[in-house]
Every structure is written in C-alpha cells, then in structure tokens.
Image (cartoon, rainbow, N blue to C red):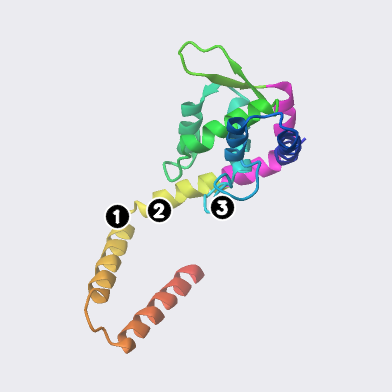
Amino acid sequence: MRIHQLHQQFCAKHERHERHGLHGGHHGHDHNEKGCMGGGKGRMRRERLFDANDIRLLILHFLSSNTAHGYELIKSIEAIAKGEYVPSPGIIYPNLSLLEEMGLITAVQSDSSKKAWMLTEEGHTSLAEQQDELSHVIARLESLGVLGDNRRIPEIQRAIHNFKIALNTKLGQTDLPKETLYSIIDTLDQAAKDIERS
C-alpha cells in the first residue's frame, strides 16, 4: 500500500483515539507535528521543496539497502542534491517516528548510542509499489545538483554578481523616476523570458 494511503489510515485511527480520549494531549501534539491534524501550527509547510510524502519515500529508499541513523539519511539526501537541498532534523525525525508507527520501518541495535532504522517487510512492499513516484523525487533531487553545478561556473557567478550590484545600486538611489523603475521592470521581465527560451 502506498505511503499516503497508510498515512491517511494511521491519521484516521489517531483521530478516533483522540475523540475517545485514548491519547493524552502531548501524544496528540506529536502526531500533529507529523501532519495528521489539519490546520494550526502542526500543518506541514507547503513552501518546502519536498513534501512529507517525498521525504518518507526517500527514507524508505535509503533504508531498503542499509540500516541508517537519522543523520546518515540527511547526508544521503544532501549528497544526491549535491548540497543544494538539506532536510532538517525537524523533517527527518518526526517522519522516522511516523514510519515506525505505520509499521514500515523498525529500530535496530546500533554500535553507537544513536537509534538506527531498517525496513520491515511492509516497508519493502510499500516502496516497491511506489517506484515511479520515487524516480520522480530522486530526479528532482538530482536536478538541484545540476543547478548547483551550473551556478558554480565562474562566468555565471560573475554575471550574477554584476547583475546584483547594478540592480542594487540603481534601486538604492533616492527619488528614482517612475519611468526608470518601469524600464528596470521591463528589462527584468525580458531577461527572464530570454533565459527561459534559450
């Protein structure tokens, strides 16, 4: 079964328990942070590059071959994106806990004091059913890495630097005529179109 379907079932069960008073307030707050409850501070922020389901898929993917700590999962995702995207511990660890409660991963003994994780049979099955989605997520990560490589080209860096200086210098002037501002806007819009079409 796909992760988002399992997640919906898990959250529905949690909400039933909440209605019947089977969980205390603190436990409910934990699940709110995992995206189960609608609205409020617990809602997953949509401005993130990857949503919670993407992150859970990546976690299952990396755990399918080896056990790993949360920090190792963060570094694995960062490596594919070549440093252009690094998920925070506040994204990884709540989703690890959620995946464990959903029965897709389990904690294992580790040589260090850190908690390590591995896939369960259900986790392998769920991951196998979502290979297309996983491929898209990994492709997006890899595209960020390519973006980072291109941004590091010296000529690109120089051009971006010169652009920022020119724009900031002009916009920093007091009493800038409206005609100049409109001209700057037109130039920026045209530059964006030219880049898109190149």
Q: Is residue 186 left or right of residue 10?
A: left
Q: Is disc 3 placed on a helix, strand or loop?
A: loop
Q: Could you give the CA–CA distance between mark 1 and mark 3, rounded to whole angstroms? A: 33 Å
Give the residue displayed 28% in from the left and 87% down from the top.
177
Q: Which residue is mark 2?
A: 150
Q: Within the magenta stretch, is there residue 12?
A: no
Q: Nearer the viewer, residue 16 or 174?
A: 16
Q: Residue 46: give its label.
A: 3
Can residue 49 be seen here? The reply is: yes
Give the residue displayed 62% in from the left and 42% down from the top.
35
Q: Nearer the viewer, mark 1 or mark 3?
A: 3
Q: Residues within 10 Å of mark 1 (few under 14, many from 20)?
A: few
Q: Is disc 2 placed on a helix, strand or loop?
A: helix
Q: Nearer the viewer, residue 38 or 55?
A: 38
Q: What's drawn in magenta, residue-wise?
A: 120-139
Q: Quadrant of the N terminus?
A: top right
Sequence-wise, the earlier of marks 1 and 3 is 3
Q: Quadrant of residue 188?
A: bottom left
Whether the residues at callouts 1 and 3 have beta carbons within 8 Å, the answer is no
Can residue 61 be seen here? The reply is: no
Q: Within the magenta stretch, is there residue 133?
A: yes
Q: Which residue is mark 1?
A: 154
Q: Quadrant of residue 14?
A: top right
Q: Quadrant of residue 20?
A: top right
Q: Nearer the viewer, mark 2 or mark 3?
A: 3
Q: Could you give the CA–CA distance between mark 2 and mark 3, rounded to whole angstroms? A: 27 Å
Disc 1 residue type (three-letter): Pro
